[in-house]
Image (spheres, rainbow, N blue to C red):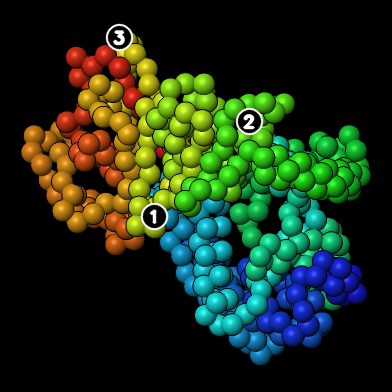
Amino acid sequence: MLNRFKNFISENNLFDDNDKILLAVSGGIDSSVMTDLFIKSGYKVGIAHCNFKLRDKESDLDEEFVKQIAEKNNLQIFTTNFETENYANNNGISIQMAARELRYHWFEHIRQQNNYNYIAIGHNSNDIVETFIMNLTRGTGIKGLTGISPKNENIVRPLLFASRNQIKLYSIDNKIQYREDSSNYINKYTRNKIRHNILPIFHEINPNFNNTILENIHRLKSVEKVYYKDINQKSKAIITKKDNNILINIAELQKLNDYKNYLYEFLQPYNFSNLVLPDIEASLNKAPGKVFYSSTHKLVKDREFLIITKISEKHQNKYYIDVDISYISKPFEMSINVDEKDNNFIIPKQSDIACIDFDLVQFPLILRKWEKGDYFMPLGMGQLKKVSDFFVDSKLSIIDKENTWILLSANKIIWIAGKRLDDRFKITDNTKRIITFKLIHNE
């Protein structure tokens, strides 16, 4: 195992012998074995541990265990605590996604501040197979079917050569202590459902299923190289740059076979969600002027070109929602639907759903963080109230307030997302059309 570990690092050029590596150590079997292999290999390492406060005393015991590993081996250690559930709720994302965002942002901060070259994550080959299945269920391009990369910028994954069972055997042979994460056995998370319910069925059909998938991924990586070579060649003939704008020639784009797939790839670098692509595609043969936004860029449908412009940093925390947008992925996932009101309609009571009188709003809507001086008229009240006072009355923490998003129409607040509607946009007996905003919480 130790030789395979060293060979995998060398073959994939993960890092040099003199590089400093920050080990992401949860205390579980994968990261504990990874730490042992790094120490025995003689690399310069430190440890980073996140306490997500999700399993009460268990989380604190994990932290103490990791501290003991660092102390025993005389390693530099960095620890932090996160209010993960609050972060997930305030940003309209799943617990798992929240934990991922929090830890990777913190790891990178620690890496830069302490002069580490890379961050090592303890993913194994089983994780590759599970991620492949997850991406299939969610929908993905070819990149999502080529597995987890051993190296991605400053992130390295030196255990991808080993299966979960091989890691288990190594831990037994070398008497590696580790902590069991009870949440790994809870089926409310998508990965656990795949691991415990779906993959066993595939293994019944094909006992060598994991290796079969890994072989398929290897073939797909070869296909990916050919695929992106063609994408790059086509882009040179269709995409030009002018005055810091990216121009996609609509006529030339539509000459391509399956041009929608090319458009998907052309827009990927600019963070446009694939779920908004149908709206962009539908605009190609319509009048100019349609505008679409990603978290970092604006796309304008002009007469001859799709013109992509980078949004200035001071405006990147503003997101625009046009009238025919049915889904956004940034700053959180939210569906948007417009329906005719009928007699059977019942206003939902969930705080993560907002139903508004469609004819009272002006597009594009703006989604942004709350600002000092914001006022709104809370549902059921006949007078304006400072948003800051509403926060005080609601007993929101400083972090909760900082992570609160506001939906506006013509500079008037429609909804404090996930918390309170504005009375001026409520549904009444005179409402004819309803626009519904629903926060999407992925598991």
Residue at x-position 56% and y-position 70%: 107
Question: Which numbered disc flags the more N-terminal residue, 3 or 1?
Answer: 1
Q: Badge 2 is on which residue?
A: 252
CB-based contact (under 8 Å), mark 2 and mark 3: no
Q: Amino acid at mark 1?
A: Ser
Task: Compute the Cα span from label 2 to label 3.
Answer: 49 Å
Q: Quadrant of the C terminus?
A: top right
Q: In the visual, does 253 lie left or right of 214?
A: left
The label on residue 245 is none
Q: Which kind of residue does numbered mark 2 sit on?
A: Glu
Asked if one can make out residue 421 in the rendered structure from this viewpoint, the answer is no
Q: Earlier in the sequence, mark 2 or mark 3?
A: 2
Front one among 312 and 329: 312
Residue 251 % position (x, y):
59, 27
Question: Which secondary structure, mark 1?
Answer: loop
Position above or below: 399 against 267: below
Where residue 24 sits: x, y (%)? Answer: 64, 70
Mark earlier in primary sequence (1, 2) = 2
Find residue 312 and name its label: 1
Residue at which label 3 appears: 343
Q: Position of residue 319 (x, y in %)?
A: 38, 44
**Which residue is pictured at 46% across the width and 65% down the height?**
82
Badge 2 element:
helix
- Give the answer, above or below, for where 400 lies relative to 220: below
Name which residue lies at 87% across and 45% down. 219
Going by the numbered disc 3, the residue's amino acid type is: Asn
In the image, 135 versus 203, the foreground residue is 135
- Could you give the CA–CA distance between mark 3 and mark 1, rounded to whole angstroms? 46 Å
**Circle 1 residues within 10 Å: few <14, some 14–19, many ≥20:** few
The answer to whether the residue labelled 1 contacts the one labelled 2, judged by CB atoms less than 8 Å apart, is: no
Q: Residue 341 or 28: which is nearer the viewer?
A: 341
Name the quadrant containing residue 292.
top left
